[in-house]
Image: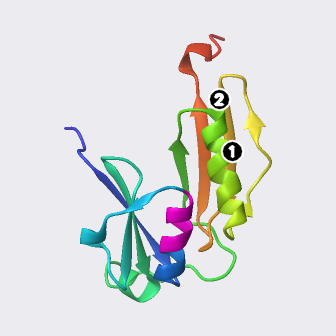
Amino acid sequence: MKISQIYVNLPVKDIQKTREFWTNLGFSINEQFSDDKAACVIMNDDIYVMFLTEEYFQTFSHKPVPKGDTAQVLVAIGLNSREEVDTVVNTALKNGGTQDEEPQDYGWMYQNSFWDINGHGWNVTFADISQFPSE
């Protein structure tokens, strides 16, 4: 079996601010799956993030939406260069996101991260597998 697409569903308070945040980072919105309750952010041709108002999100799950300073999931995305990683994180910070931790350089992999305006954690990485340590 092979998965053909991934849709990550995340609750948010304000759809319009969320749309603006992610388009400012350079991502597109799939308007076919977006309205006043949802914004479908296109990560690539096969991966989408469905940001849903908290009320709408609750129609998909009987569990409560986390409130306050909690973390339920950290989403990791891989980009094509260290420069792209820092550009995305710095743009997120300029648009209301917050720094999660200082950038980490492992030689073969570089990681930077942020919390978006809704409190969701994003680890943004670039990895050069050819430099992966053999021991």
Percent of width and height locating residue 99: 75, 59
Question: Mark 2: which amino acid?
Answer: Met
Residue at left offset 73%, top offset 28%: 106
Pick the residue in front: 25 or 7: 25
Start and end of the magenta stretch? 19-25
Colour option used: rainbow
35 lies above or below 95 = below
Q: Is any atom of residue 62 visible in this view?
A: no
5 displayed left or right of 25:
left
The N terminus, quarter of image:
top left
Pick the residue in front: 26 or 6: 26
Magenta span: predominant SS is helix
The C terminus, quarter of image:
top right
Residue under numbered circle 1: 86
Q: Is any atom of residue 50 visible in this view?
A: yes
Q: Residues within 10 Å of mark 2 (few under 14, many from 20)?
A: some
Among the 4 quarters of the image, the one containing residue 66: bottom right
Percent of width and height locating residue 59: 32, 84
